[in-house]
Image (cartoon, rainbow, N blue to C red):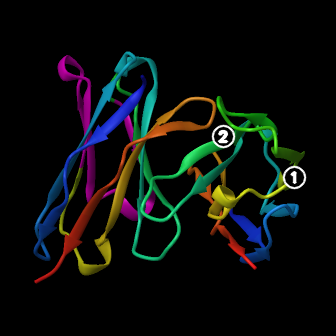
Amino acid sequence: EIELTQSPGTLSLSPGERATLSCRASQSFSSNYLAWYQQKPGQAPSLLIYAASLRAPGIPDRFSGSGSGTEFTLTISRLEPEDFAVYYCQQYGISPFAFGQGTKVEIK
Amino acid sequence: QVQLVQSGAEVKKPGASVKVSCKASGYTLTDYDIHWVRQAPGQGLEYMGWIVPRSGDTYSIQKFQDRVAMTRDTSISTVYMELSRLRSDDTAVYYCARGYNGWSPWGQGTLVTVSS
């Protein structure tokens, strides 16, 4: 069973700053099956990135994903006010599928 | 547009069962798997299992294997998740999500409250 650990737990930043979120897996798996989701309060998660680096339709290019093996990163190049939210990584290639515990990006 | 619409909030007593529906529109239900995820208040996302609508095959994680049943009615493009023997720690928002290149879209969520 693959476990995902996200860091940091909370990221306090100002609009316009760069955010770097990390996701580490307990064992290596194909990057084809790593996704990132954004969740705002009271809303369902929404897909940002799939296959580690591919943006979902409609996702702005300030969001980028990278990584392979056991180390993955979500980068938000310049934070917009609407980007303050919780972000989850997920592996969906090997059952049981799993989510990281989330990183909250909050306004500093 | 492609969307999943879930049934409304439920309040149940401990020991009861709850059945949540997830209706697909804008695409053919049988073309993609449907996954179920729950989120307890203030907590993260917990994966529960999935159904292959084309065949009806299901998989659930060990934690839920003896309590969860996932079914589908392809004639109305709807899948169902039934959780039995409810406990207070089953209080959560339950989501369905379409599995394809990452999971998207997600249903709006169904709040299930278990309280005596």
N-terminal label among 1 and 2? 1
Could you tell whether B83 is left or right of A59 in the image?
Answer: left
Could you tell whether A60 is left or right of B71 in the image?
Answer: right
Q: In this view, does A82 lie above or below B58?
A: below
Both labels 1 and 2 in a single chain: yes
- Please tell me which residue is depicted at 88% across the width and 45% down the height of the picture: A66
User: Where residue A29 appears, x then y in whole percent?
Assistant: 79, 45
The residue range painted magenta reads: B57-81
Subunit ID for the residue under disc 2 = A
Q: Name the residue under label 2.
A: A93
Amino acid at pointer 1:
Ser
Q: Is B76 in the magenta? A: yes
User: Where residue A5 appears, x then y in whole percent?
Assistant: 73, 68
Mark 1 surroundings within 10 Å by alpha-carbon count, few (fewer than 14), some (14 through 19), many (20 or more): some
Q: Mark 1 points at which residue?
A: A77
Subunit ID for the residue under disc 1 = A
Q: Is residue A1 visible?
A: no
- Please tell me which residue is depicted at 37% across the width and 15% down the height of the picture: B28
User: Where residue B108 appears, x then y in whole percent?
Assistant: 36, 48
Image quadrant where one finds the N terminus of chain A? bottom right
Using the image, tell me which numbered label, if any, was put on residue A7.
none
- Please tell me which residue is depicted at 52% across the width and 36% down the height of the picture: B104
User: Which image quadrant for residue B23?
Assistant: top left
Image quadrant where one finds the C terminus of chain A? bottom right
